[in-house]
Amino acid sequence: MDTLLHPSPTSSMAKRPCPSSFENPNLPSSFSQMDHLLLSFLSLADSSPPVSLDLSFDRLLDSTPSDADQSLLIDRAHNLGSLLLRAANRSARKRASLHNSIAWALPPDLTIKVFSMLDSQSLCYAAATCWMFNTCVMDPLCYENIDLTTVVPKVNNAVVSTMIQRAGKSFRSLKLGIVPSPTSPPGSCQPLVYTIRNSVDVSSFSWNEKKTRQGKESSILTRSCLYPLSGDNGAAGALLRRLHLYNIERMDNTSLCVALAACPSLIDLEIVGLSHVELRQTLMSVSSNCHMIERLFFESSKTGRDDSLKSPTCVDFVNNCPNLSSLSLRGFKLHDYKVRILVKGFRKLKYADFSTSYSITGTFLRNLGSGSGGNLLEVLILRDCMHLKEVEVARFLTAVIAGDFKFLQYLDISNREGLASEGDWYQRSYNSSIIPLKQVLEVRPHICLLAEFPSDGCFIDIDHMFDSDVNSEVSLPSQLSSHTSDGSFLMSSSESSYNSDQGSGNEEYQDSARLSDMLSLNNWKEALLKRWT
């Protein structure tokens, strides 16, 4: 021990041989002098108690007169212990990897395939398991579909950039943001909008922690979290096929449009709860850059308040994105004539969801299933559309009974406030006798028809429902081109006024405007509540 830590000039290895090393005939002949010395040192752990090592080390220090030499001796002991610990850990990992490679039945290529199906958090856990798994996790194929959604904020821009760099040319899908609950199944109207201030699931999270602190990286995604898509001349964005963004409060129109401009191959776009992103700007960007889009899901964080969509934007969207087969616009203020442009314009549309959308009365459904555009619908969801009229629902179901909408498989017309009456939208219907529900199920038994209404009246949130419509658009442009020979769709103004449904088809819009001129807002609320009760 003394020789190992503090060799004296007069001592030599020949004077202190290790009997166990030389007398053991099973040791390889290739062992060096260092190998024998290390074996002799490690054998002390079994034969000598720890106190003997302490006493031996103290004697070495006492035999060194100089304080500097004693410090040097202690440093050498520390270094030697660190080297031995590092070597032991490395050897343990190698042995564990060898054991795993024998016990793990899958070859590396199939292991990588399995890991590529994991979410990003599980992938990190697998990488920390052993050296073999870590090697497989570093393969770019494991980052083909990056899922960084969390329940509480704990992912920042640097994590997103690192994951995209690891994906390389295998990059195909990206999910970011906060998802408070599992993604709802098709047909569900469960909201995914989430805000940290109002959430009870993140009581331990302080809003002040969202502010970037000096010397620390924030755990919040900012508006620049998508910049890696447009960096390096848009190399990563050009590969992206699916982009899902959830409740990133700092995302704005400019940042999202820059990201979409770098994603020409995008086929699936899902946006939920981006409070600073408008529907009109998003559709314009998608229409200009993402011509291959097949699915668009957009849920507003401000239900009924986003009235930014204009008719020309709808027409451009239809013309430039002919492959769209699934469209969900939830929580926006959409008038019937705009919805009709979209539903009738997309010739491949099979899934349409306008849940919780304001100003939709249902007139866009007239004569929709008999001609081109809208006749391929398989799923139609109009849940909790506050202005949806019972007479329009009855007309639609009558057309279904007559043989229109032959591919329809799922229909949801449920409303927590009941359907609107023909005359006044605030006179609600809860058990309408004019809606042929039973006849539909008899003629089309394969249709899943949801028509859930309250048993009696309940209070309506008047503050939320009465939103300013003065500046909204009320008529189609006077001139819209007709259907062209190259297959692109352009609607004419004559087609927009069908079945005496001229203009927007939203009579309640004009009525509320007249009422607002006659009464103050408070008086109007009182009159409405008295009539409701």
Image (cartoon, grey):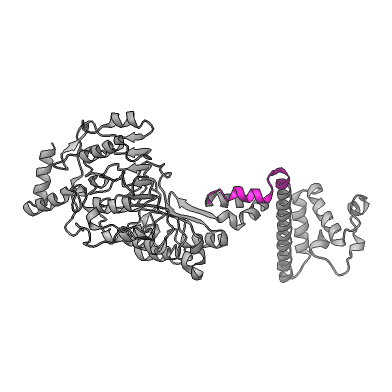
Magenta-drawn stretch contains 199? no
The one of 482 and 109 positioned closer to us in this rendering: 482
Residue ranking furthest to the left: 518
Query: Above or below — where is 40 with respect to 431?
Result: below
The one of 388 and 276 positioned closer to us in this rendering: 388
Magenta-drawn stretch contains 112? yes
The percent coordinates of residue 136 (x first, y second) are 64, 53
Residue ranking furthest to the front: 485
What is the count of numbered marks? 0
Residue drawn at x 48%, y 53% as measured from the top left: 148
Query: What secondary structure prevails in the magenta region?
Result: helix
For the record, the magenta segment spans: 99-119
The percent coordinates of residue 259 (x first, y second) are 42, 64
Q: Is residue 215 visible?
A: no
The percent coordinates of residue 235 (x first, y second) are 52, 66
Query: Above or below — where is 364 with respect to 216?
Result: above
Residue drawn at x 84%, y 58% as measured from the top left: 35
Q: Is residue 445 visible?
A: yes
Residue drawn at x 49%, y 52% as measured from the top left: 147
Is 71 left, or right, of 279 in this rendering? Answer: right
Q: Quadrant of the C terminus?
A: top left
Q: Quadrant of the N terminus?
A: bottom right
Is 224 left, or right, of 501 in this rendering? Answer: right
Query: Above or below — where is 451 with respect to 223?
Result: above
The one of 40 and 28 positioned closer to us in this rendering: 28
